[in-house]
Amino acid sequence: MEDKKIIIAIDGHSSTGKSTVAKQLAKKLGYIYVDTGAMYRAVSLYAMRNGYINEDYFDIEKLEENLINIDLQFMINPKTGLAEVLLNEENIENEIRTLAVSRYVSKIAAVSKVRKKLVEQQQKMGINKGIVMDGRDIGTVVFPNAELKLFMTATAKDRAERRFLELKERGEEVTYEDVLKNVVNRDHIDSTRKDSPLRKASDAIKIDNSNLTLQEQFDQILKLVKKITVLNS
Ligand code: DC
């Protein structure tokens, strides 16, 4: 009998490799992968481009009024086979990965009206199951009934090192100290915001990958998936 499709919710701190493992799982299982952080990043880019937010200014009302003008879609890149985010039909996959966007995204993600719009869209994407979604509130708010919930974490130092190398590889001029500061700052804002703060769902399985290789982590998680899909079939 074919295994029944499930929903896999992956939450955790920033730069814990959630998207890496989510992509591996989606590929292995033939599931859809949705990076919800990309959606919050896309809204941030929109706000930055329109001058609603900068270092010492954030016009929340203007952003809220204009949410209706923000259309987000995912499109598969035929070269990589991975979904990339479109903001009003423009592919902004590269622009949203910069440290500049990372600096504002937690403030944008704390706005309830932004969350409401994106959560509704995310829930629609999961209607047919067979989905791996990563973010901060997937197991707690978006899919509280997900069959498998993971909560990923690692030390801030490990995470900043990984993110620093990733940004360097993309050609960004950044310092390790700035990346570490951003990781710590985002953890703080994401975990202390009023609406859907980052926290582990009580039924999520915690994975600290500070000392795990990617392969070890993937094998460990795949075992959990197998156990659940067999139980569900
Ligand atoms: O996963 P990421 O680092 O690309 O996410 C960017 C930011 O978006 C993160 O700092 C918090 C926010 N976010 C959120 O609040 N809820 C989600 N489901 C996903 C991301």
Image (cartoon, rainbow, N blue to C red):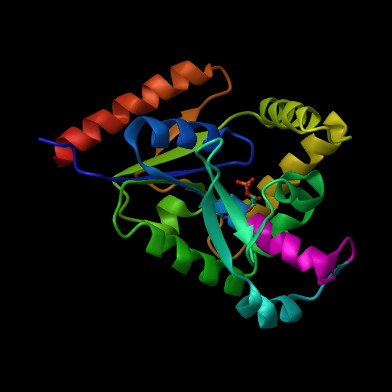
Q: Position of residue 212 (x, y in %)?
A: 52, 18
Q: Residue at x 77, y 45 (%)?
A: 98
Q: Which residues are magenta?
A: 40-56
Q: Quadrant of residue 90?
A: bottom right
Count numbered badges in the picture: 0
Q: Residue at x 67, y 63 (%)?
A: 43
The C terminus sits in image quarter: top left
Q: Where is 74 relative to 166, above or below?
A: below
Q: Position of residue 209 (x, y in %)?
A: 53, 24
Q: Nearer the viewer, residue 41 or 112?
A: 41
Q: Where is 69 relative to 97, above or below?
A: below
The N terminus sits in image quarter: top left
Q: Is residue 136 visible?
A: no
Question: Along the horizontal axis of the image, is 45 left or right of 13?
Answer: right
**Residue furthest out toward the left:** 1
As for residue 177 lying within the magenta part, the answer is: no
Q: Residue at x 72, y 61 (%)?
A: 44
Q: Position of residue 145 (x, y in %)?
A: 30, 54
Q: Where is 25 relative to 128, above or below?
A: above
Q: Nearer the viewer, residue 55 or 85?
A: 85
